[in-house]
Amino acid sequence: MTFDDLGLSDAVRGAVKQAGYSTPTPIQAQAIPQILERRDVLGIAQTGTGKTAAFTLPMLTMLETGRARARMPRTLIVEPTRELAAQVEEAFAKYGVNHKLSVALLIGGVSFGDQDLKISRGADVLIATPGRLLDHVERGKLLLSGVELLVIDEADRMLDMGFIPDIERICKLVPFTRQTLFFTATMPPEIQRLTGQFLHNPVRVEVTRPATTASTIMQTLVPSSDRDYEKRETLRQLLNSPELKNAIIFCNRKRSVVELHRSLMRHNFSVAALHGDMDQPSRMRALDSFRQGTIKFLVASDVAARGLDIPAVSHVFNFDVPHHAEDYVHRIGRTGRAGLEGTAITLVAPADAKSLDAIEKLIGKPIAWSGSPVKAAATPTDTGSNSAKPRKAHAERPRSRASSRRAGASASQVSAKKPAARVAPEREVAPRHEPSPHARPAAPSRRSHEAEPAVVGLGDHVPSFLLRPVRTGG
Ligand code: AMP
């Protein structure tokens, strides 16, 4: 099959040729003709499969007829992160070289003024993150009633980031008759419910997920201490390897990203940091200098780095073993892309045994050690000690929007949506803009007092009168 067989316009096919693509990827071959037939599509695929072009190319073809009206975009693409949104904008620039379409990007961290100007002139394509999009709608500056096609991209990440209530709102703001393209890498029940509710008789296109890791990636475990300064020393030795061209170094917490970045700078490594607390220009600067090779190392958190298209990374390091096994697959998938060889090195401390076990189960094979395997640390229950307990999540707090109704979006609501075991210590949790109407504060816990330190004040006991609902004025 070639790009000539998919029903794309001449202008689009010209751009594809210019981009150097000769054969459509499986998701492109399956989805493009269906999208051009105006069918709803449920695409089960992740980044790296060519899914961006799978929706961008037919959209460009369809947008060749018709005109945008002021404040009423014709198509809308919702992305979970600013970087992904910016990446889709770049895709429109690349594949839309033969078109004169207006593309507006609405993301947080940049001023409203320019965005407003763009919408007011009329946008053929609006690419947005959920929070900023709804901000514009609430200000009365943006109408979604003219949207003919809606793309929800990376829906399972939206779920992880607490964006589902926002997505439901957006789906209700666009016309019922619009065409919807819905992309997700996995189908957890909440996503299944959403597709049932908002897709009309969709065509399901599924491309095999790299549940296992690419064979072009050499994976190694390196034993390390639990102490950060010793881990950093181990890492520095590894970073000095002569065959290393460039590397992304993943940490579990944004605070670790900051600390490691600072430490590597002090040791004169050419390095930038990428985490969710950075403002947008700094994030883009870090990414660009890494892409262009001005810097050699990028220290990153999962939330900031997932899904980004960064070609030709020779090494990936896991400074921390990820708490979720799927994150391991995503992280090391940054290397060994497009048939190139890659190396993934994971520092494993004694406390990481459980996480490592889950990773090896997911990828279906053991990972080779360089040096002798570390021994699993005794769990807190074994010893009665608290030292290995995850510290309380001061996680990246949702940066709430200005509106006062957000006052109720407490941390307990965030955790109420996720099973406790999935909440990692200080794990980067992306902005949650709006509390789900269904989310309730978690019930206060009553722990056993056995083998616990002396109780201070009321300890964990909450007198029942404090648990009664309080009515507030207004
Ligand atoms: P995506 O899954 O959209 O993030 O795309 C992953 C990478 O594949 C991007 O760098 C695209 O430029 C590239 N790509 C998309 N479609 C094709 C194609 N048909 N042939 C070769 N590369 C492609």
Image: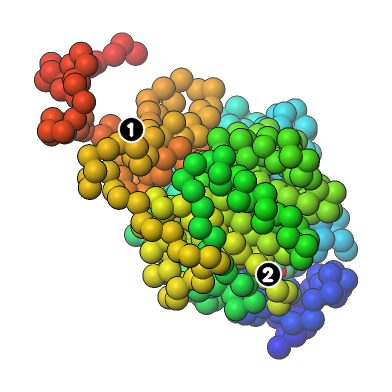
Q: 107 or 397, which lies in front?
A: 397
Q: Amino acid at mark 2?
A: Gly
Q: Residue furthest bottom?
A: 1
- Compared across the picture, whether 440 is left or right of 66 comes to left
Quarter location, residue 194: bottom left
Quarter location, residue 65: bottom right
Quarter location, residue 353: bottom left
Give the residue at x 83% y 53%: 293
On whether ligand 1 comes within 8 Å of the CB at mark 2, the answer is no
x and y percent of residue 163 in the render? 47, 44
Give the residue at x 44% y 26%: 406
Looking at the rendering, in which quadrant would you find the N terminus?
A: bottom right
- The residue to which callout 1 is attached is 412
Q: Is residue 438 above or below residue 139?
A: below
x and y percent of residue 290 in the render? 78, 50
- Compared across the picture, whether 383 is left or right of 350 comes to left
Q: Amino acid at mark 1?
A: Ser
- If the picture is divided into quarters, which one holds ligand 1? bottom right
x and y percent of residue 233 in the render? 62, 46
